[in-house]
Amino acid sequence: MYGDSIVEDLMVASNALMTSADLVAAAVIRRLEPTKDSISQNQAERKYGRAWIRGHIQAGHLTSRRTGGAKNSKIVFSMLEIESLRTAESQIVASIKEKYKRGQKKTVLNKSMNKM
């Protein structure tokens, strides 16, 4: 019914809308019940990977806060902030992959044209 490129575009648009809806839902939860938006550093590292969380903390992409005034108080992050970062990161990676694929196709076409 549709060409392959149109189907791919529809899937990309559909995924983008679903991701946007998830982020809006997370923002609503954060506004209505801020405590449900929090995740401890330990939980975040288990869920998203220790290296990923710590790498983004060091890069300044994630902000944390302590739940108390003591040195050993629990460190928490915003789930919305983490999910937004993951979404942005995956979209950038997908964009780079798409550019690479297009560049790869052009290279293959150029090589085959040169052989003629």
Image (tube, helix red, strand yellow):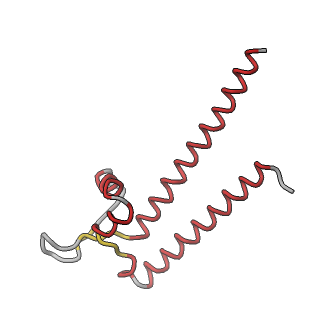
Quadrant of res 74: bottom left
- State the count of labels: 0
List x then y, in percent, for residue 32: 44, 84
List x then y, in percent, for residue 92: 52, 49
Q: Nearer the viewer, residue 51 or 56?
A: 51
The residue at 56%/42% (across/down) is 96
Would you place residue 82 above or below residue 29 in this image? above
List x then y, in percent, for residue 85: 44, 59
Give the left or right position of residue 71, taking residue 6 as reference: left
The residue at 59%/37% (across/down) is 100
Q: Residue furthest bottom?
A: 32
Quadrant of res 102: top right
List x then y, in percent, for residue 10: 73, 58
The residue at 63%/66% (across/down) is 17
Quarter holding the C terminus is: top right
Quadrant of res 43: bottom left
Q: Nearer the viewer, residue 116 or 21?
A: 116
Q: Residue furthest right?
A: 1
Would you place residue 42 above or below residue 54 in this image? below
Quarter holding the N terminus is: bottom right
Would you place residue 95 above or below residue 40 in this image? above
Give the left or right position of residue 32, taking residue 19 as reference: left
Q: Residue furthest left?
A: 71
The residue at 54%/71% (across/down) is 22
Q: Nearer the viewer, residue 24 or 55?
A: 55
